Image (cartoon, rainbow, N blue to C red):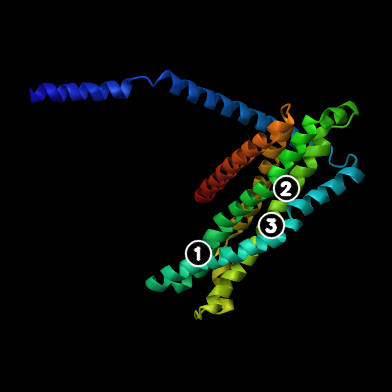
Amino acid sequence: MQGDLSKVLRLEKLWLRRAPLPKTYTDFLGRKLFAFLLTAQGIGAFGLITLGVIVRKFNAASNVIHPMVRREISRAGTRLLPMFFFVAIVLGFLVIGQTMAVAARLGAINYIGTIMVTVVVRELGPLLVAVLTLARVGAANVIELGTSRALGEVEALEASGIDPVHYLVAPRVLGMTLGVFSLTVYLILAALASGYLFIFLQSVPLTPTAYCSEIAGSLTWLDFVLLALKTCAFGFFIGIVTCYHGLAQPLRLEDVSRVAVRAVSQGIIVCVLIDALFFLISLGA
């Protein structure tokens, strides 16, 4: 009897393992996968088109486009400096505060600089800048472009012989790329400085020279290269994703807010994937 019961249980487990999912689940997953592939294809094609327009028409209508690029750099960079300086100070205090609590128990005070480089410079700093810029400026791009598309302004530009990608997308993508790169540098420097300020307030026996030496000793030329490439990739793809959702489909005014939420969500996913890709590159280097 016990042998028959165990056989039945094994058959049940085998059937549960091989049983097909309910049709509603497969349909749901299929639709999600198909929508993801279509979106990825559209964003990739839109990114290649934008990159081609930037390369081919960089000096075309420079008296119009270049001031727009500078305006977008100001919007995605200079205007956000006060907020990012505050975030950098808080980030430095939190990282050093947590590090001090652990290092004091383990007697590893001399590793504070290394931890700051690992956490702030390589990972948390660039990703935090990308997400905050996406939420602040990327959402505004979707709303502006989506409203222009819904009101027919994009079609009016095309009818006038003006390339909407060159006029509307290229300045935003370039401004976002340079803005994210600059903000990341400012945030990292301010976070490292605020980290030492916390050390000084806690009367830790670590001189500024020793702190800077630990940070410099933990950095390599590869860190600078990967940081520059990563931040530029963050800015470029944030600009591409937000502009794609603002322009790539006909919109009604009531759809703009929904598309903005979708663009921010997908932008965060793209940033995380880029960060994971660069992490794998740094491991293999």
Mark 1 lies on residue: 115
Residue flagged by tag 2: what amino acid is it? Met
Instruction: Of the two numbered discs 1 and 2 on the same chain, state the one appearing first in sequence.
Output: 1
Q: Which residue is drawn at 54% across and 70% down?
A: 214
Which of 158/223 is in front?
158
Residue flagged by tag 1: what amino acid is it? Ile
Secondary structure, mark 3, is helix
Q: Which residue is drawn at 82% across and 31% down?
A: 154
Mark 3 lies on residue: 183
Relative to 137, does residue 121 appear above or below in the rendering? below
Numbered disc in front, either 1 or 2: 2
Q: How crowded is mark 1: few (under 14 residues within 10 Å), some or many (20 or more)?
A: some
Q: Residue at x 49, y 69 (%)?
A: 97
Q: Where is residue 100 in the image (x, y as percent from the top left)?
A: 46, 71
Marks 2 and 3, how far apart at CA: 10 Å
Q: Residue at x 56, y 56 (%)?
A: 124
Instruction: Of the two numbered discs 3 and 1 on the same chain, state the one appearing first in sequence.
Output: 1
State the residue lying farthest toward the front: 254
State the residue lying farthest toward the left: 1
Mark 2 lies on residue: 176
Note whether residue 255 is visible: yes
Instruction: Of the two numbered discs 2 and 3 on the same chain, state the one appearing first in sequence.
Output: 2
Numbered disc in front, either 3 or 1: 3
Residue flagged by tag 3: what amino acid is it? Leu
Marks 1 and 2, how far apart at CA: 29 Å
